[in-house]
Image: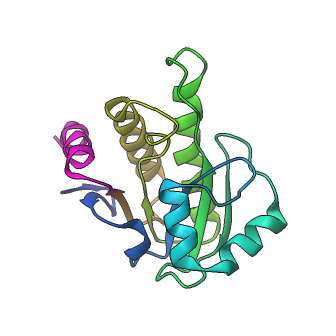
Amino acid sequence: MQVQINEAVLEIVEGDITQQDTEAIVNAANNELRVGGGVDGAINRAGGPAIQAEARQIGYCPTGQAVITTGGNLKAKYVIHTVGPIYRGGTSGEADLLASCYRESLKLASARSIKSLAFPSISTGVYGYPVAQAARIALRTTADYLEEHPEIRLVRFVLFGQQAYEVYAKELEKIGG
């Protein structure tokens, strides 16, 4: 499912983010940029040691910010690492931090002339962010960015499982509606 926003395509697919043919993929990282579980573990396993070697040199990424490394053995040339918030009930600034993850990742892509990138659903795994709330923030923040930044041509959300896909599809319909 996809919508057109200015010159860009914003789409959602169900699948494996490590298999995407976009110029960059986004990793849901931890502050220390060490290999974790979930999306982070999958990206590091598929991309090989070059990603972790660069991440170790960077050393740290604050929550809501983003850094970039090589894509290693991935199809994607780059991995943008962003640190999502741990969900604590929604009253500790989580929504602003989550929106910042998407915005900062997109800014980094623009700065590097990256025209296509793929996002996972940030913070909805072990960090516990409710998927429906996260989908609304992710898609709205991305759509708003694409309205102002024609240099990015494709943003793909790669979702793990049919349930996550359906939640994102409902939110995308509201944007493309």
- Nearer to the camera, 170 or 149: 170
Extreme residue in the front direction: 37
Given residues 22 and 32, the one toward you in this image is: 32
- Residue for point 70% across, 70% down: 52
55 left or right of 88 in image: right
Residue at (18%, 41%) from the top-left corner? 173
Residue 132: x %, y % from top left: 31, 32
Q: Up-down: is 126 above or below 89?
A: below
Q: Main secondary structure of the magenta part?
A: helix
Magenta stretch: give its range: 159-177
Task: Return the x and y of residue 115 as percentages of the image width and height.
Answer: 47, 71
Picture coordinates of residue 156, whole percent (x, y): 35, 61
The outermost residue toward the top is 91
Q: Residue at left 75%, top 51%?
A: 32
- Is 15 contained in the magenta span? no
User: As displayed, is residue 30 above or below residue 9?
Assistant: above
Q: Is residue 63 left or right of residue 159?
A: right
